């Protein structure tokens, strides 16, 4: 099972200029940059909760091509019951080979918990 029923997922794009706005046009609708929203209802709406909601959000993104040679995995925290790690690297969208061929940076945080209690 890839995602738990209570898993949370959100995406944040930092858009600094009008040029970069067009580069991230496929991700703007789901952007949950908390600095953009004064309304907590809008913040909550952008948060995907549950495996079906998360998989649906991931499927809605355009096709991407990730460069595995750029991947970095940082193990932030580890216990037998909980692991937090961050995967980062570069990707580009496959749909727009001319304008979207520039690589973009991604960073994804995973918190992995054990569903069954740890036995002593």
Image (cartoon, rainbow, N blue to C red):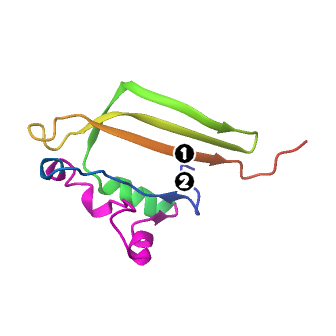
Report if the CB atoms under discs 1 and 2 are less than 8 Å apart.
no
Image location of residue 87, percent across then percent down: 47, 36
Count of residue discs: 2
Residue 46 magenta? yes
Image location of residue 9, percent across then percent down: 47, 57
Q: Quadrant of residue 36?
A: bottom left
Q: Earlier in the sequence, mark 1 or mark 2?
A: 2
Q: Residue at x 20, y 40 (%)?
A: 94
Q: Quadrant of residue 74?
A: top right
Q: Residues within 10 Å of mark 2 (few under 14, many from 20)?
A: some
Q: Quadrant of residue 57?
A: bottom left
Q: Residue at x 32, y 61 (%)?
A: 30
Query: Where does label 1 land, which residue?
Result: 110
Left or right of 63 in this view: 2: right
Q: Quote the CA–CA distance across marks 1 and 2.
A: 10 Å
Image location of residue 23, percent across then percent down: 17, 47
Q: Which residues are magenta?
A: 21-50
Q: Is residue 45 above or below residue 30?
A: below
Q: Is residue 29 above or below residue 61?
A: below
Q: Which one is in front, 14 or 4?
A: 14
Residue 33 magenta? yes
Query: Where does label 2 land, which residue?
Result: 3
What is the secondary structure assignment of the residue under circle 1?
A: strand
Q: Residues within 10 Å of mark 1 (few under 14, many from 20)?
A: some
Image location of residue 103, percent across then percent down: 24, 34
**Quadrant (top left, top right, bottom left, bottom right) of the C terminus:** top right
Q: Residue at x 41, y 69 (%)?
A: 43
Question: Which is in the foreground here, disc 1 or disc 2?
Answer: 1
């Amino acid at each position: 099972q890839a995602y738990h029923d209570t898993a949370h997922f959100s995406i944040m794009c930092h858009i600094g200029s009008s040029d970069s706005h067009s580069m991230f046009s496929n991700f703007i609708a789901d952007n949950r940059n908390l600095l953009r929203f004064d309304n907590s209802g809008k913040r909550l709406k952008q948060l995907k909760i549950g495996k079906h909601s998360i998989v649906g959000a991931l499927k809605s993104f355009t096709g991407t091509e990730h460069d595995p040679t750029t991947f970095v995995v940082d193990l932030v925290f580890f216990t037998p019951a909980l692991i937090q790690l961050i995967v980062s690297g570069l990707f580009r969208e496959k749909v727009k080979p001319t304008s979207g061929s520039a690589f973009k940076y991604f960073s994804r945080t995973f918190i992995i918990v054990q569903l069954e209690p740890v036995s002593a």
